[in-house]
Image: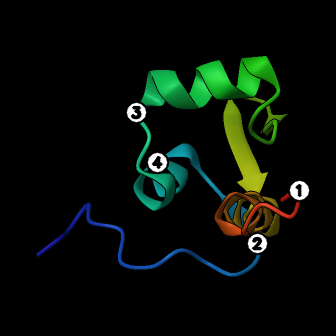
Amino acid sequence: MKSNQITEFPSQGLVREKHILAYVNFSHSTLWHRINDGAFPKPMKDGRCTFWFAQDIIAWVNSKAAPDKQS
């Protein structure tokens, strides 16, 4: 049986939008609003394929989870 469920986020390599949306729990439109605002890593394109480096997404998530150091 084929499943569309994403079970885990890769620690390296290239990831597509569906992996990112499952990992960060954003909608498609929220993801692209944040990219356009500069608040999320920009993707790369190879022809019609859009992808991100998994390490960039993990670093972004970790930076959001880190405690505020400006206290």
Q: Judging from the image, what secondary structure is the residue with disc 3 in?
A: loop
**Circle 3 crowding by C-alpha within 10 Å: few under 14, some 14–19, many from 20:** few
Neighbourhood count class around disc 2 (C-alpha, 10 Å): few under 14, some 14–19, many 20 upward: few
Q: Nearer the viewer, mark 1 or mark 2?
A: 1
Give the numbered dot on residue 13. 2
* Residue that extends furthest to the left in the rendered view of this protein: 1
Q: CA distance from mark 4 to mark 2?
A: 16 Å
Task: Tell me which corner region of the image, top left, top right, bottom left or bottom right, holds residue 4.
Answer: bottom left
In the rendered view of the protein, which quadrant contains the N terminus? Answer: bottom left
| Most foreground residue, 22 or 47 | 22
Looking at the rendered structure, the kind of residue marked 2 is: Gly
Q: How many residues crowd around disc 4 within 10 Å: few (fewer than 14), some, or many (20 or more)?
A: some
Distance from disc 1 to disc 3, alpha carbons, whole Å, reads 30 Å
Q: Secondary structure at mark 1?
A: loop
The tag earlier along the polypeptide, 4 or 1, is 4
Q: CA distance from mark 1 to mark 2?
A: 33 Å
Q: CA distance from mark 4 to mark 3?
A: 7 Å
* Residue identified by numbered label 3: 27
Side (left or right) of 65 relative to 56: left
Q: Are marks 4 and 2 in contact (CB under 8 Å)?
A: no
Q: State the quadrant of the C terminus.
A: bottom right
Ranked by sequence position, the earlier of labels 4 and 2 is 2
Tag 1: residue type? Gln
Image coloring type: rainbow
Give the mark, 1 or 3, whose residue is nearer the N terminus: 3
Residue at point 72%, 27% (across, down) = 35
